[in-house]
Image (cartoon, rainbow, N blue to C red):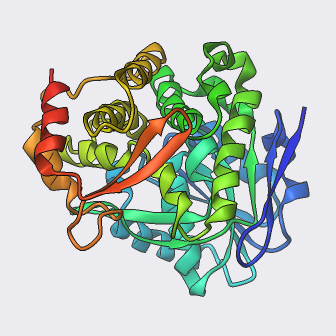
């Protein structure tokens, strides 16, 4: 069954199409003109090469696979590849891949020739329900995640749940981290294990995408409630950076959700039952709930470059209850460190 979710966005509305087999029939969704498909070295033989054979006037560009390549150096190389492919301002970039490809190719599309059309084709569960929706694109700096970026709304988002059949189990669990986040924020049905079955992937994706769409339509430029989507992410981004990205994003989000719930309890925003429930849900999907041997002091220091912090003041998205997020500022370092220390091991 095909689903279409309409998104109202600055600069023009767009559709998110969710349909099995969609990759085999892309031409109906694409504008005319030159198309450059940007993917990574892992996905190119799986999907990229066939895609350009099926599309007239298309070229394929590959970037390396991994968060460590989500950089300005990679974007600079992509600019050269786009020029060499003959892409002009009437053409389009297709970002075919997970969150790293979507963010990096999206930023290239936003800035190449002052902006060309962008089509997002997410291939991981995480990118389907999170990074491909909402128009945020960008890259990392050594000092922190996503510190360089732009708002670039896609012309459309094309989601084919069939590609999840080739998704490694670890990547599926990572996507579940963002889905749990959406459930904690706005849709408790996403926390029901019966919905987590892979044969219900299309429904799972649709429900999770709808949560994000509802939020970003209210606040497209992250000046208010859109910040709620960062639940667990202040912790997660610090974990990724301190671990030199040996933790995948979804794994860091999972333990970040546990940390956010524990901090909420430590500050008296919720009862211990909620913190325990969040940890149990994260554990059930197979994501980590402990910090291994990461140093709490190093993690707190890494949080200092978080985009959500303002003028050096801490800023966390926490929970007052299920589906009751709240932004809390000026949380003491001692309280944060205590929560982190309890999670080491």
Nearest to the observer: residue 293 or residue 112: 293
Residue 280 in sight here: yes
Nearest to the observer: residue 142 or residue 61: 142
User: Residue 271 in the image: x percent, y percent?
Assistant: 37, 26
| Residue 105, quarter of the rendered image | bottom right
User: Residue 180 in the image: x percent, y percent?
Assistant: 53, 31
Residue 94 in sight here: no
* Residue ID at (25%, 24%): 290
User: Residue 78 in the image: x percent, y percent?
Assistant: 48, 69
Query: What quarter of the picture does the N terminus occupy?
Result: top right
Instruction: Judge whether 31 appears above or below 195 on screen.
Output: below
* Residue ID at (39%, 33%): 270
- Asked whether, in this view, residue 193 is left or right of residue 311, the answer is right
- Asked whether, in this view, residue 330 is left or right of residue 27, the answer is left
| Residue 315, quarter of the rendered image | bottom left
Nearest to the observer: residue 269 or residue 133: 269
Q: How many marks?
A: 0
* Residue ID at (58%, 86%): 114
């Amino acid at each position: 069954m095909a689903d279409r979710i309409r998104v109202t966005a600055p600069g023009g509305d767009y559709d998110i199409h969710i349909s099995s087999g969609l990759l085999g029939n892309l031409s109906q969704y694409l504008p005319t003109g030159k198309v450059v498909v940007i993917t990574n070295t892992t996905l190119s033989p799986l999907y990229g090469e066939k895609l350009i054979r099926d599309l007239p006037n298309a070229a394929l560009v590959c970037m390396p696979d991994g968060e460590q390549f989500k950089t300005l150096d990679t974007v600079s190389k992509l600019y050269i590849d786009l020029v060499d492919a003959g892409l002009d301002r009437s053409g389009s970039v297709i970002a075919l891949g997970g969150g790293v490809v979507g963010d990096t190719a999206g930023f290239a599309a936003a800035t190449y020739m002052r902006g060309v059309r962008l089509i997002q084709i997410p291939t991981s569960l995480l990118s389907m329900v999170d990074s491909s929706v909402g128009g945020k694109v960008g890259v990392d700096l050594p000092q922190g995640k996503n510190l360089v970026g732009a708002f670039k709304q896609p012309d459309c988002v094309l989601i084919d749940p069939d590609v999840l059949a080739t998704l490694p189990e670890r990547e599926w669990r990572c996507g579940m981290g963002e889905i749990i986040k959406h459930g904690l924020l706005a849709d408790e049905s996403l926390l029901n294990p019966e919905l987590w079955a892979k044969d219900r992937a299309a429904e799972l994706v649709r429900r999770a995408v709808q949560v994000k769409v509802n939020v970003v339509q209210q606040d497209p430029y992250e000046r208010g409630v859109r910040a709620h989507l960062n639940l667990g992410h202040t912790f997660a981004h610090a974990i990724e950076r301190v671990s030199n990205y040996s933790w995948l994003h979804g794994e860091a989000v999972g333990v970040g959700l546990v940390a956010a719930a524990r901090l909420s309890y430590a500050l008296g925003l919720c009862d211990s039952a909620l913190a325990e429930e969040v940890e149990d849900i994260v554990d059930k999907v197979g994501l980590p709930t402990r910090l291994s041997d990461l140093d709490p002091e190093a993690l707190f220091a890494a949080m200092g470059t978080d985009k959500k912090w303002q003028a050096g003041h801490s800023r966390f998205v926490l929970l007052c209850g299920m589906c009751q997020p709240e932004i809390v500022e000026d949380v003491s370092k001692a309280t944060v460190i205590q929560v982190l220390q309890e999670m080491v091991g």
